[in-house]
Image (spheres, helix red, strand yellow):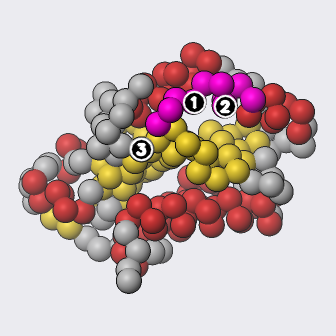
Amino acid sequence: MSMSSIETVQQSIEELIEKFEGDPNFFTSEMDFHCYLYHLLVSKENLQRNFISKDEKNTGLVHAEYPSVLGFHVDLVVFEPKTIANYKLKEQRVMCQIEIKVWRSIARFNVENERQLRGRLGEDKQAHKFIIYLYLAKKPEYWQEFLADLRKLKGENEKIFLESTTAQALVTKIEPGISW
């Protein structure tokens, strides 16, 4: 049985976190994480196909810095393959949104930033949403404080998808259909 596109995204996120756990110095910036996850996604067979949009543009499924419903750019998205032909390239339905947040010094929890992030992602009701948090500094007390504050804020529809036990990484998943 072949994997669904969402399962492929989840597997790729797990591979990203495994790489971070095994070799944290491989990544020196947030963009390194974006690029590596993009590479993992487009290397998967079921995400490699090309499609023609309604405005006759040839496109793939995975895109970086794609404008959301509200016009904010999302770090990585995966288009809904079943509907690409029904929409223009810049108006595609997104099956999955991924945001990556990285800290190199003190991991500070900012309630307003987190609410804004979830609000922006929540406007796209049909998309699965993943928020990947990574902490590059070696100050576990800051990371633990951040996690405690995050757990207080996350909504009922937001679940911990993956929490690393060997690196300072956490991934949350917000299911489609429920907005903030």
Q: Earlier in the sequence, mark 2 or mark 3?
A: 2
In the displayed structure, 44 sits above or below 145; it is below
User: According to the image, label 1 marks what residue?
Assistant: 154
Q: Whole-Å distance between the Cαs marked 2 and 3?
A: 17 Å
User: Few, some or many C-alpha atoms within 10 Å of disc 1 (few <14, some 14-19, many ≥20)?
Assistant: some
Q: Earlier in the sequence, mark 3 or mark 1?
A: 1
User: According to the image, label 2 marks what residue?
Assistant: 151
Q: Whole-Å distance between the Cαs marked 1 and 2?
A: 6 Å
Q: In this orientation, which residue lies closer to the viewer: 103 or 160?
A: 160
Q: Is residue 71 left or right of residue 8?
A: left
Task: Verify CB contact (< 8 Å) between mark 3 and mark 1.
Answer: no
The amino acid on which the numbered mark 2 sits, given as a three-letter code, is Arg
Q: Whole-Å distance between the Cαs marked 3 and 1?
A: 12 Å
**Where, quadrant-wise, is the N terminus in this rendering?**
bottom left
Task: Verify CB contact (< 8 Å) between mark 1 and mark 2.
Answer: yes
Q: Is residue 153 magenta?
A: yes
Q: Which mark is residue 80?
A: none
- Residue at x 78% of width, y 47% of height: 168
Q: Is residue 67 magenta?
A: no
- Give the residues drawn in magenta, as a range: 148-157
